[in-house]
Amino acid sequence: MSSQQAPKPAATGAASDRRRWIALAIVMTAAFMDLVDVTIVNIAIPSIERDLGASFGAIQWITAGYALAFAAGLITGGRLGDIYGRRRLFLIGITAFTVASALCGFAPNSEMLVAARLLQGASAALMVPQVLAIVHVTFPAHERGKVFGLFGAIVGLGAVSGPLLGALLTQWNLFGLEWRPIFLINLPVGVAALILGRKYITESKAPRALRLDLVGVALVTLALLMLVYPLTRGRELDWPLWGHLCMAGSVPVFAAFVVYERYKTRKDGSPLVELSLFRVKSFAAGIAVQLTFGMVMGIFFLVWTLYMQIGLGWSPLRAGLTGVPFSVAVSAAAGMSVQLLVPRFGRKVLQAGAATMAAGMLLYIWEAGRYGTAIHSWQMILPLVVMGVGMGLIVAPLTDAVLSEVPREHAGSASGLINTTTQMGNALGLGLVSVVFFGVIDEEKLAPSAMGQAFTDAFQNSLWWVVAVLGVIFAVMFALPAKPKQHLEAGAADEPESGAGEAAGERPAEPEPALAR
């Protein structure tokens, strides 16, 4: 048991032990599961809709529910790992994630599927924040660059394989299960990760763990639900008065959260969110970029799937293969931006990414209008590649740019907050699909023969909104530093804190470590 509970061997003896590479493979597999699960569902949505008779509101909750539960629990999951042990929380999270995947796969109706997706997102919030923390305590500083390079490759692989894997599993209709294998495939992977994780992952805790801010958790979760739930259900319920009141009421709840976090900081120095970070201009601007960019992604990927599979009547496989050029362009541009472009041109690379992505959207709008429902997959390649290049120029260097002026001691907490904000934006974007996409479709008066053109018009309308948001992102990026400084997250983790933890040979806490999603 001592090898599991004392962090010291993880930084010394285990550093030369092949066990650490097995541990890395385990946590990276879990991260891959989460990345794939975010994108794999979109491609199977039409099949789910037909099989379960799900309403458009339920379809949105199947996607937005996961993102919302993940966002609401991400910071809390990181804090729980610091307090109770990262290995323990990782194993709890992957167990719950596997159980939730089984519930999704065997869901008899849309209500059960929505509930299971919420549980799956909450489970991911426990599992995912531990990944980078486990890497930090398992690998010495000089090896982490190589490890994070591997993680970047996993992110790219997840972006490429998620839609394609979902398309193949849905198209093959294994054992007559239609869309269900996209969730059931997680079961053997989750069980294997659980068994091997218990054996190979070394336990670690923060030497001076902060208390869990339960009131902060409750307030931020309530505020998010009050904002996103009415957006998701509003159109289906004909925009009732309580929905508008609920959205308006989320503002004072968010305000109460800020007031309480200030009080919590004065009281015991253990708030859920370190509000002093927002005094750093580049960080505050970066949070705004992360939130709005998350909205862009939430809107685009869902309406894109609905457009291709319902509007154009394409099969899941054809839709999945159509998206491959986009994913490849994202991965290629992301690697090039970090290694070659950002060191030379700084934030101009990110702004060029926003402008390029907007240009791809405009090209897509033109092609959708020009070719209508007769458009072919090959005609989408150019706008998708342009959009993919733009997205790749943004997603890879954005976190470094936002963190570059954050005080070293708060880099871990800032990283967790950045990623949580991205997930909040994603959930908000999925909710806004009710307005920007379904808001221009009158289902009751829509003849089946007009479905394709109606979905094409709604797709174009959604992309115009996305272009407008990208314009806002471009402007806000002027507040980012012209040239990102040294990446502080790794530096913060490398510098041991003085005190009891250091004396005991423990590594300092990396507050709220989270994946750059």
Image: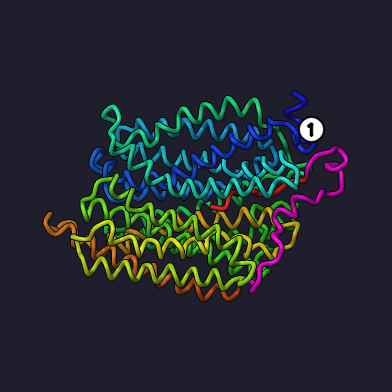
Q: Which residue is mark 1?
A: 13
Q: Is residue 23 left or right of residue 189?
A: right
Observer-nearest of 8 and 337 = 337
User: Percent position (x, y) of residue 8?
Assistant: 80, 35
Q: Is residue 245 left or right of residue 274?
A: left
Task: Assess whether residue 496 is covered by the magenta stretch.
Answer: yes
Residue appearing at x 55%, y 57% in the figure: 335
With respect to residue 191, does 148 lie above or below? below
Q: Name the quadrant containing residue 398.
A: bottom right
Question: Is label 1 in a helix, a strand or a loop?
Answer: helix
Residue at the image point whose x is 38% and y is 46% from the top:
163
Quarter of the rendering occupied by the N terminus: top right
Is residue 130 a member of the stretch shown in magenta? no
The residues colored magenta run 481-507
Q: Residue at x 27, y 42 (%)?
A: 47
Q: How many circles with numbers are drawn on the protein? A: 1
Q: Is residue 232 visible?
A: yes
Residue placed most toward the observer, 492 or 26: 26
Indicate left or right for 338 with 455 as reference: right
The image's colouring method is rainbow
* As drawn, 40 above or below 299: above
- Residue 158 placed where, x, y %? 47, 46
- Residue type at the position of mark 1: Gly
Give x and y (percent) for residue 332.
49, 57
**Residue 229 spot, x, y in % from top left:** 40, 53
Tell whether 385 sits left or right of 33. Answer: left
129 is higher (above) or lower (below) than 183: below
Q: Residues within 10 Å of mark 1 (few under 14, many from 20)?
A: few
Q: Nearer the viewer, residue 246 or 185?
A: 185
The quadrant holding residue 458 is bottom left
**Can residue 230 be seen?**
no
